[in-house]
Image (cartoon, rainbow, N blue to C red):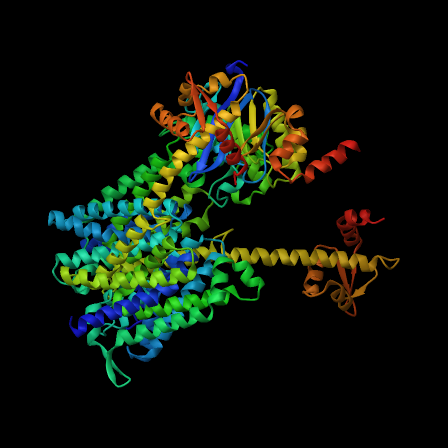
Amino acid sequence: MSGAQIEIQLIGIVVAAACALPGVFLVLRGMAMMSDAISHTVLLGIVLGFLATGDLESPWLLFGAAAMGLLTVSLTELLNRTRLVKHDAAIGLVFPALFSIAVILISRFARGVHLDTDAVLLGELAFAPFDRLMLFGSLLPRSLVVMGAIALVNLVFIAAFYKELKLATFDAGLAAALGFSPALIHYGLMGLVSITAVGAFDAVGSILVVAFMVAPAAAAYLLTDKLERMLLYSVGLGAAGAVGGYWMAHLMDANIAGSMATMIGVLFLLCLLFAPQRGLLAVAARQRRQRWEFAQAMLAIHLLHHEGTPEAEVENRLDHLQDHLRWEPAFAHNVVQRADERGLVRLENGSLHLTEAGRGLATTMLADKR
Amino acid sequence: MDTKQLAVQVADLTVAYQEKPVLWDVDLDVPQGVLMAIVGPNGAGKTTMLKAILGLLTPAAGHVSIFGKPYQQQRGLVGYVPQRGSVDWDFPTSVLDVVMMGNYGKLGWLRRPGAADRKAALSALEKVGMADYADRQISQLSGGQQQRTFLARALMQDAQVYFMDEPFQGVDATTERAIVDLLKELRAQGKTVLAVHHDLQTVPEYFDWVLLLNVRRIASGPVNEVFTDENLRSAYGGRVGFLNKRQDHESA
Amino acid sequence: MGAGWASSTSGKIMNLLDLLHSLVFDHTVRTVALGTATLGIVSGVLGSFAVLRKQSLLGDALSHAALPGVAIAYMLTQSKSPIVLMLGAGAAGILAILLLINITRQTRLKEDSVLGIVLSVFFGFGLLLLTFLQRNPDARQAGLNTFLFGQAATLLTRDVMAMAIFGGLAVLLVIVFWKEFKLLSFDREFGASLGLPMPRIDILLTTLLVVAVVIGLQAVGVVLMSAMLVAPGAAARQWTNHLGRMTLLSALFGAIAGVSGALLSSLGTGLSTGPVIVLCISVIVLISLILAPNRGLLWNYLRQWRNRGRLRTEAVLENFYLMSSQHDDPSHPHAVTALEAVSGAGNVRRSLEELQRRGLATPHSGNTWSLTAEGVRAAQARLQPALKDQP
């Protein structure tokens, strides 16, 4: 591996980590699409910053971008509060408008400058190692330094306000009652999303930032219920996607950021299918298992209901199950057989009777309905 | 009992969400021409029961017939009043328009509601005391008026059996009175009504038939036979504050 | 604005005339304007339903998700014909929707998370495919600019024809299934209880939304397509409470934005059409939000202000009467300051003037006022129920 290769992977890992941290809260709070909006509108902040300073390297650009991210959030909320449009429409109105202004400003006033909209939307990780800056006596890739710093800021913010974030995410009402300001936490978090989006679009572009923020966090949400673990897993998944994506791009001679987003998508898909508790396969297997259990309980309850009633003769006949429970003959047969094996029912000349065990199951199931 | 006279017959209805039972093996016979309240504690499966009967959810087992035939063949005989909160009342449409939706099933594809439908909708609105509101935008309605609009839409269906999900939820006294009168009128016409109801106090006054439900059927039948303290206790568990009040009331 | 813009009023008027001239006589400009107008109409119609069904961000996800479809269609056919690429984009859009619906239904993830994932991962995959096909990993040279921002200026007559045919078909289907779509958007469950196949109606409407997106991609591009589906409907909703009128108005707004965007960018200012169209429609939205009668912010503000004034006037009338009734003579004059002390904050003098206009109060010298006989009666009528309650 060459130095540049290692550096690109390192940058990918740091971007993934920086994005995954606030991403977890976006996913939990149902605001994932805000990341899409913010990552587009920061462009306007950068353009305005550039027009004001005339310098693409100025730190004011970062500041302007973060401010524009927050402005996007508050404009969306303002619009939402008028009740004239719904929340999703508010997002869909604000960000394209701000983004369009940015694109028009660039094409009118910033032509020829190295500020081109494709670069902002797509980024280019392959060039990242060439843009270096001096720090602590060594020449480091700019992206690595910037994203490293942003990841650190995210980490510090989340560690410092962990309790508050957790409370504001799961019980905003209680948080307010305890004297935390959910609004402050909310805007703090949105500030992080904005800074992260600005830092990351250089490397991966503003569209794929969304993949880095949302997909690992969503995958982690399928793996665990614990917030600490979710943060850890989503950083891990994002990093794995970045490294895997790098090598896939290397093999295919294709775009690195696109490949990383694809790989993160693949990891999400794997979690979606194979997550131990909530994966689709686990759920299907559990449902299959429960289906038999459930059907036996249903049979027992059905028999219990009609036990000792005049219509029991009819209701308890094996062939009646197909009729009334709407079970396929084969399925009904299978259920009865299983129930018989477990000693829940007895079959006497085509008529079913509950055993003591069967009666016990039916009563507990009914009592334990919640 | 002759099956022909049963407006609704439910047999062994079991509904589960994610293999978690919400209704267990419910049997229910509803004769034609009764006003039936479906009562039970929160989470007892009352709304689920209505939706399963209407085919809006797929039951794990059991079947439903309306006047002796499977539900799918009898849709034309059924009217539905969903919960008021289930729709967006800021939708750009008028009261009359919502009421005319009751006829969309019978209109068929490609046909637009015509003058006859308009007239029918206006007369349905008249029956619920909303004739003056026909052209009103639905976002300008009070809760009670929203409920009456939904009732008019169900009347527009010109059904034999009406299923209502909490028709009295959050309505004003005038609307409550209007709905009760409407229910009595429907009964007088030989129609059958099944309504999810929350207020136990008014069950004997408004309804003549009751289903006590708590995941399974506790009891069903005429109110004076079935609406007993014992049955209520077994449906509501320990929460029987109402019962004591009722006894006080009766002894007074 | 900038130096390229006309610098004087007469110049502006000349420009406007030029614009109209080129709209009528310049073939290229006419083609582009026709194309963007078609796009505006189709996305206006379908967008109305998307906004009402709270699917405003679906268009955003769909347009991004189209990229791998375009890449694969090209890979399979080696053709860059718009129809082939549109079909590829449409297929990818439908796949994206299926994933979206199923993942949202079967997991505990919220819809917006799944939207974000579908949007970005599909786009990333498309980027991977496209750069792989061109054997050039630099995304900036992949010719994506067209896809990102559209290229309305390069629309040819046959492109516009294709847009018009697909779009016309979509609008026609909306007209045919109007009442079903209305029912789907307002009360889906009630529709199902009527026995209508609501899932299939949903699939049809969503497919038409995909058609609108696909049509728009070439003209305004991925990023701004979402605005074309949200903004016309959101603006139209403010002006009317009638679904049919809202949809028509939405189509009109879309068309106006499309045409004016095409004309403004044809001025030779170097502006790409997509962002200009979006700015035009955004201005329409802003005007609608503020000025639309009944719903608009200005209207709302005026109504509140009037209500507050009316309530204050009535409060002053009642207080005035209560003060006066402590004297034997109800028309006894009182100082404005005394009334202010009783009525609390607010402009008491303006309320008094309002009462005077209605003939209920009269001013006297020394900054005092009294109720007229009429005023006493009015106050008594207002207070009657309250007074009756008192023992």
Identify which residue is drawn at 18% across, 70% down: A5
Could you tell me if residue B58 is visible in this image? no
Camera-nearest residue between A256 and B234:
B234
Q: Along the horizontal axis of the image, is A141 left or right of A275?
A: left
The number of discs equals 0
Q: As drawn, which residue projects farthest toward the top? A: B2
Q: Along the horizontal axis of the image, is B246 left or right of C297?
A: right
Q: Along the horizontal axis of the image, is B28 left or right of C230?
A: right
Quarter-of-image position of residue C186: top left
- In the picture, which quadrant includes the C terminus of chain B? top right
**Residue A322 sits above or below residue A133 on the image:** above
Camera-nearest residue between C73 and A145:
A145
Identify which residue is drawn at 36% across, 54% down: A223
Could you tell me if residue C353 is visible in this image? yes
**Residue B109 sits above or below residue A314 on the image:** below
**Residue B23 sits above or below residue C155 on the image:** above
Quarter-of-image position of residue B70: top left
- In the picture, which quadrant includes the N terminus of chain B? top right
What is the x, y in percent for residue C8? Answer: 32, 70
Q: As drawn, which residue projects farthest toward the bottom? A: A137
Quarter-of-image position of residue A111: bottom left
What is the x, y in percent for residue C336? Answer: 76, 67
What is the x, y in percent for residue A255? Answer: 19, 62
**Residue C224 sits above or below residue A190 on the image:** above
What is the x, y in percent for residue B112? Answer: 40, 30
